[in-house]
Image (tube, grey):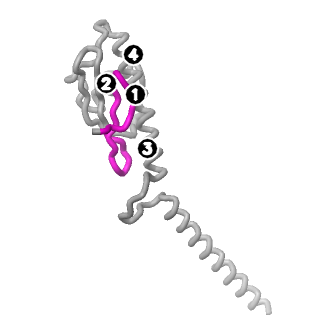
Amino acid sequence: MRREAGAVGLIGMVLVLVIVLAAAYFMVQSGGLRGGKGEERGPTPIDQALMTSALTELRMVRQGLEMYRSQSGSGAYPASGEINSIEELRALLPAYLALPDSVSFTFNSYISTAPDQFLLKVHARDTGRTVLEVSSDFGPRRFKP
């Protein structure tokens, strides 16, 4: 009698475990936390978090460039040739802001067409490598060709 009760309890626990694992699998699939196996879906929560982080970091970069312009003797943004990588951007701005060691974007291009104008383009580290841009005229946004 005791063995039968133990076996029934063990079978019950295995069934509960299988149900919980199946429910977790379906929640992950429907929640978009894993890839959709080629299906077209909206951005995943992880991609949304990466985009938000990249936009926040670009706001910091814009503020740093604004401080650079206001505190430099020339009143100009860095020239186009001064920033060609994220490392050069980091080296130029430490007095004005500190970027995190690991940013949520990769450097694409920086151009300054006039002393009071700049345009910085980056790729977010989301799965779609969304192009983002920030300039002296506008805050961070998605690039729209």
Q: Residue 141 in magenta?
A: yes
Above or below, 140 against 93 in this view is below
89 to 1, vertically: above or below: above
**What secondary structure is marked by label 3?**
helix
User: Which of the two discs, 3 and 1, sits closer to the camera?
Assistant: 1
Number of residues whose C-alpha sits closer than 10 Å to that of mark 1, classed few (under 14), some (14–19) or many (20 or more) = few
**Residue at numbered disc 3:** 50
Front-most of residues 116 and 122: 116
Helix, strand, or loop for circle 4?
Answer: helix
Q: Residue at x 38, y 18 (%)?
A: 66
Amino acid marked by disc 4: Met
Q: CB atoms at circles 3 and 1 under 8 Å apart?
A: no
- Residue located 23% across and 16% down the image: 114
Question: Split into 4 quadrants, where in the image is the C terminus?
Answer: top left
Amino acid type at image mark 3 = Leu
Which residue is found at the position 45% from the left and 53% from the top? 44
Q: Mark 2 touching mark 3, by CB under 8 A?
A: no
Secondary structure type for disc 2? helix
Q: N-terminal of the two: label 4 or label 1?
A: 4
Provide residue 107's location: percent of width, then percent of height. Answer: 29, 36
Pointer 2: what residue? 91
Disc number at residue 139? 1
Gap between marks 3 and 4 measured at Cα = 26 Å
Q: Which residue is mark 4?
A: 67
Residue that lies at the very extreme toward the front in this rendered image: 145
Tell me: 140 left or right of 111: right
